[in-house]
Image: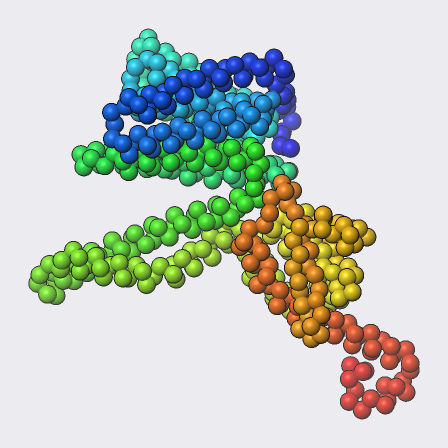
Amino acid sequence: MIVTTPGAQAPLPQLGDRGAWAVRLLWASFALVAGWLLADLAIWRTEPLPIIVLQFAKSAVLIAVSFILIKRRPRDSVAALLAMTFLVWTISSSFGFRSTDLLPVVIDRIRFVLFTFSLLLFPDGEWGPDRTRFIAVATAATFMLGIIEATGLVQTQAFLPMAVACVLAAIGGLIARFRTAESDAVRQQLKWIALGLVLGVGLILIGRASAALTAPAGLPVLSEALFQLGIIFVALGFVVSLLRYRLYDAETAISRSAALFVLTVAVVSTFAGTEAAVEWMGQQYFGMGIGSNISGGIAAGVAAVLLNPLHQRISEAAEHRFQPDLAYLKNHVPEFLEELCLSEAPREVARFFLLSVNEALHANCSALLGFDEDVIAAVGIAPEPLLLQSAGELFPVWIEVASVCSGRKRLLLLGGRPDGSSFGRDELGAIKSLLPRLRRALDISDAAEALRRQCRAQRQLGPDVLQSDPSGRLEE
């Protein structure tokens, strides 16, 4: 649920029967046009084959995403808006970026207003703070201005900057929703949207910039690939978020994407800088130019040597930034286990570990069973139901935690996530890497607890027993 300020508008209702049928008919009309243009692209277009393949793949993905949304969320107003948006996007992009004909320009304006309203109402069809209403009014006014410009009634160039401002304001509304959201699921949805928008819009801008800069060199395939891939990322971000598919992998996807981007920039910069430095040194000290093959080979070798250290450092930095709970689990929990095991009972040690695991993995519940299948600690669920007969349904992941001292095994049980998705390999790998520390902490805590019980029992027997202990360990 989204938290709204007082005076915010009421949420949009779910579509009724008539509204759902009207949306389906309108969607079917757009789908027929998009399908016809897709067939026209495959049969009659004269562009180079790689560009046709890229445009066909993008259009196929957008049509598939639109169909999935209208099929899985037939009464959802936001899903309906996005389904229309992706179909209109398919239609408008089929005419070319620089087309000035009236029909493609009008369709492009329709895509703008549908997409902006989708951002304003995402994810649950609820209006945000009062400023959302003003953004919606500004979007409608910008759309009308764009139609007037397209018909030639007014000779201005104000539509594009105003449209960009409206989209940026709508994205700012998503950021405000993220900050005020109480539901963890909504926050995860918005993270997927952020990933799709950042990757998609970034690739679209890079594609357009490269098309403008490399026009004389004739590199249309690369520019078109970046542009079409950007549109696909935007669509996939929305469909994953709305369908709530693997919501809790958002941090992992964001962390890996950021690490890959920074690593690519670092490796390319290292290669280019090393190649330029080798050529300069050859001219300065040897009085001759070094061949491109030699300088390129040296630069490639330097980049290859630095690849693994760069990858490790960049991945760790991205994990600390975008997966702080997992980074805390891997880097700080072992130290706290070593400190707790000396002063706390096994139950408290296990409970601290389970709380950290639940926070990092977004698990509903977790439990640690002892040697005799008794419950040492449980988080997110009462200990009573933790019987082996029902544990298989409550906890899909069982991990053995063998004792170093006795060789007997404890069981770490992990419950599922709120969206029903499974844990990733990196997350389970982090848990398994901590098991030796957990075993040692539990064994030390067991031994310390047994010693404390023995000392308390000896104190209850009286001072004579303490006097018979020449080492003074019991008194200590």
- Up the image or down, 469 lies above or below 325; here it is below
Please report the residue visible at 50 percent of the width from the left and 51 percent of the height from the top. 321
- Up the image or down, 246 lies above or below 384; here it is above
Residue 242 in the image, given as x and y percentages of width and height: 56, 32
Quadrant where the C terminus lies?
A: bottom right
Q: How is the image coloured?
A: rainbow
**8 relative to 382 in the view: left or right:** left
Residue 430 in the image, given as x and y percentages of width and height: 56, 59
Comparing 111 with 172, the one in front is: 111
- Up the image or down, 19 lies above or below 412; here it is above
Comparing 140 with 318, the one in front is: 318
Residue 328 in the image, given as x and y percentages of width and height: 57, 57
Please report the residue visible at 65 percent of the width from the left and 47 percent of the height from the top. 416
Residue 401 in the image, given as x and y percentages of width and height: 66, 65
Quadrant where the N terminus lies?
A: top right
Please report the residue visible at 60 percent of the width from the left and 59 percent of the height from the top. 431
Please report the residue visible at 48 percent of the width from the left and 45 percent of the height from the top. 254
